[in-house]
Amino acid sequence: MDSATIKVLIVVFSFLSGSIPFGYIIGKLKGVDVRKHGSGNIGATNVSRVLGKKIGLLVLVLDALKGALPVLVVKFAGFPLNYQLMAALFAVLGHCFSPFLRFRGGKGVATGVGAFSVISPLNALIAIGAFMFVFIVTRYVSLSSITAVATYVLTFKYLVSPCPEHFLFVAVAGFVIIAKHYANIVRLIKGEERRYGA
């Protein structure tokens, strides 16, 4: 099998894995369309608000696992880092632009955590530490998530790889996740963002 075919298979598998809308599916099983409640997002934070923290935690774990799965498959199959990063990026894109929800989706944070933790657990732990620090201080999930993503991206070349091609995958994923927080950023600037638990 040539490299082009392998790349196509990785892209398709990773995108479809990431695109499974667990928040939406579990909400429907509970008789609720989470897109019509709270922030309208299918991610763990909104699910937690709408259906409770236990369900929100379940969605968080499932969203992380669907990001980790394709990267683990690619990694254990012996493919190099650029293939693993490709899998991570397309898992995030699948979550953000799910074909099962007319190419709409969540913000990609949990899926990104799962995918990029496989790439570099140390870098992910540092990013999670940044998330926890900002969250404890501010109680803003959105600001904490943006900080964590930026931390992972900015430290990647020092902790994982200085290769520009490798960095590009991480930067694009980070840009997409932060861009999906556009409405949150606007509310943060206006002082209208809801703190977690409010």
Image (cartoon, helix red, strand yellow):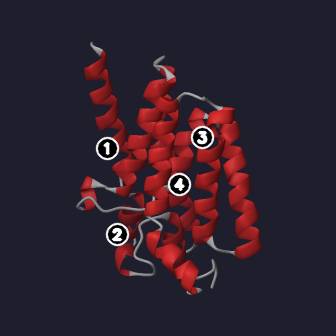
Can you say which quadrant of the picture contains the N terminus? top left
Q: Amino acid at mark 4?
A: Ala
Residues at circles 2 and 1 in contact by the CB criterion of under 8 Å: no
Q: Which residue is mark 4?
A: 110
Snapshot quadrant of residue 176: bottom left
Instruction: Between residue 167 and residue 27, name the one nearer to us.
Output: 167
Secondary structure, mark 1, is helix
Residue position for label 3: 117
Disc with the residue nearer the chain's start (1 vs 4): 1
The amino acid pointed to by label 2 is: Lys
**Residue flagged by tag 1: what amino acid is it?**
Leu
Q: Nearer the viewer, mark 1 or mark 3?
A: 3
Q: Is residue 107 left or right of residue 17?
A: right
Residue 78 in the image: x percent, y percent? Answer: 48, 16
x 33%, y 43%: residue: 15
**Disc 3 marks which amino acid?**
Ser
The numbered disc on residue 65 is none
Left or right of 155, for residue 9 = left
Q: CA distance from mark 4 to mark 2?
A: 20 Å
Label 3's element?
helix
Q: On the image, numbered disc 1 is attached to which residue?
A: 16
Find residue 28 and name its label: 2
- Front label number (2 vs 1): 1
